[in-house]
Image (cartoon, grey):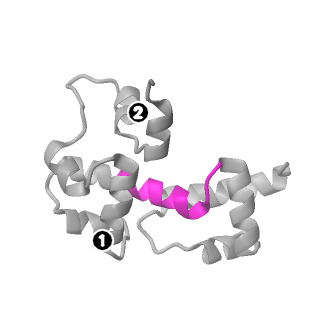
């Protein structure tokens, strides 16, 4: 079980990743900012949130990339660099893993948003879902 003080620090790390997703972030610098080792931060973060700090950060970046691609005024490459992905190949692979389609297909097709859709529903529809989660949720 993680103590309250550690949870406060982990929340600070998570908030920073959500706010500064487009900045160069790595586990070592995030850990240093909250006076933890990178290994300890990773273990505690996974214990508290169910995923590694890197995975959480990549999900936030993909969510932002999805929003930028839906706008339609940026190329996939421009979106890749706007969310601080250094490699188009890695970005495209991770995007496809989380969203289920490559970014170019998502840009052409967009999300299934309807006019007048409530923002809370739109957020749920456009949230990236890992393929293993989608497979677990699918009816058999």
Where disc 1 sits, the SS reads helix
Q: Quadrant of residue 43?
A: bottom right
Q: Position of residue 9 (x, y in %)?
A: 73, 59
Identify which residue is drawn at 41% across, 28% down.
120
Q: Magenta part of the protein: which range?
A: 50-64
Mark whose residue sits in front, 1 or 2: 1
Q: Is residue 23 left or right of residue 12?
A: left
Q: Quadrant of residue 82?
A: bottom left
Q: Earlier in the sequence, mark 1 or mark 2?
A: 1
In the rendered image, residue 60 lying in the magenta stretch gets the answer: yes
Identify which residue is drawn at 54% across, 56% down.
56
- The answer to whether 105 is drawn above or below residue 35 in the figure is above
In the rendered image, residue 32 lying in the magenta stretch gets the answer: no
Q: Is residue 14 left or right of residue 73?
A: right
- The answer to whether 7 is drawn above or below residue 139 in the figure is below
- The answer to whether 41 is drawn above or below residue 133 in the figure is below
Q: How many marks?
A: 2
Read off the residue under disc 1. Answer: 89
Give the numbered dot on residue 128.
none
Identify which residue is drawn at 34% across, 39% down.
126
Read off the residue under disc 2. Answer: 124
Question: Neighbour class for label 2 at 10 Å: few (<14), some, many (≥20)?
Answer: few
Q: Position of residue 125 (x, y in %)?
A: 35, 33
């Amino acid at each position: 079980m993680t103590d309250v003080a550690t949870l406060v620090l982990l929340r600070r790390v998570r908030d920073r990743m959500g706010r500064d997703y487009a900045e160069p972030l790595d586990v070592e610098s995030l850990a240093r900012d909250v006076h933890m080792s990178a290994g300890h931060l990773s273990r505690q973060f996974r214990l508290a949130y169910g995923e590694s700090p890197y995975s959480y950060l990549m999900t936030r970046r993909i969510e932002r990339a999805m929003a930028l691609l839906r706008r339609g005024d940026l190329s996939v490459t421009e979106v890749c660099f706007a969310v601080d992905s250094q490699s188009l190949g890695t970005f495209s692979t991770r995007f496809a893993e989380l969203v289920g389609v490559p970014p170019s297909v998502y840009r052409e097709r967009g999300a299934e948003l309807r006019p007048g859709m409530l923002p809370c529903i739109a957020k749920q529809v456009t949230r990236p879902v890992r393929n293993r989660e989608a497979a677990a949720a699918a009816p058999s």
